[in-house]
Image: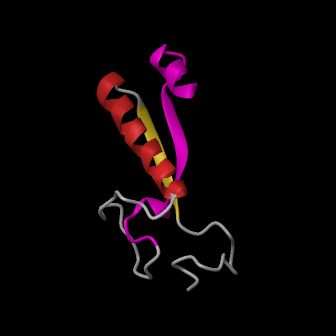
Amino acid sequence: REREDMKAGMMEALSFGSSYEVYNNAQDSSPHEETDALGAPMSLYGTSKLLNEITAATYFNMYGISSVGLRFFEVYGPWGQAGTAIND
C-alpha cells in the first residue's frame, strides 16, 4: 500500500527492513559487505527479504521512488540466536 501511495505522490520515500539472509551464504561465518553477491537465499524468509529489495529497485527504476533498505545482521542482543552465522 505504501508504494501505491508513493506513486500517487502522497509519500516521497520508503524505508524497510531487510536481513543478512539475502546473501547466498548467510550461514557461513565470514563477514558480509553490501557489495557481496545476492540471490538464491537459503530460506523463504531470505527470499521474501530479497524480493522486497528487488521490488524497491524496480519502483525506483519505473517511478523514481527512493527507498532505503536496512539489512539487519543480529537483532537478538548480546546472546544472539543459536544457528546464526554470528553465534555459531
Stretch in magenta: 1-26
Residue sitting nearer the eye, 42 or 35: 42
Decide: is 3 above or below 9: below
Q: Whole-percent x and y of residue 47?
A: 46, 53
Q: Measuring 48% from the left and 25% from the top, which residue is drawn there?
A: 12
Residue sitting nearer the eye, 4 or 40: 40
Q: Whole-percent x and y of residue 78?
A: 68, 79
Q: Whole-percent x and y of residue 36?
A: 31, 65
Residue 18 is inside the magenta segment: yes
Decide: is 14 above or below 74: above
Q: Measuring 50% from the left and 61% from the top, which residue is drawn there?
A: 43
Decide: is 81 above or below 1: below
Count of number-bearing discs? 0
Q: Measuring 34% from the left and 58% from the top, which residue is drawn there?
A: 38
Q: Whole-percent x and y of residue 62?
A: 31, 25
The quarter of the picture where the N terminus appears is: top right
Decide: is 26 above or below 11: below
Whether residue 66 sits left or right of residue 84 in the image: it is: left
Whether residue 55 sits left or right of residue 36 in the image: it is: right
Residue sitting nearer the eye, 74 or 46: 46
Residue 4 is inside the magenta segment: yes
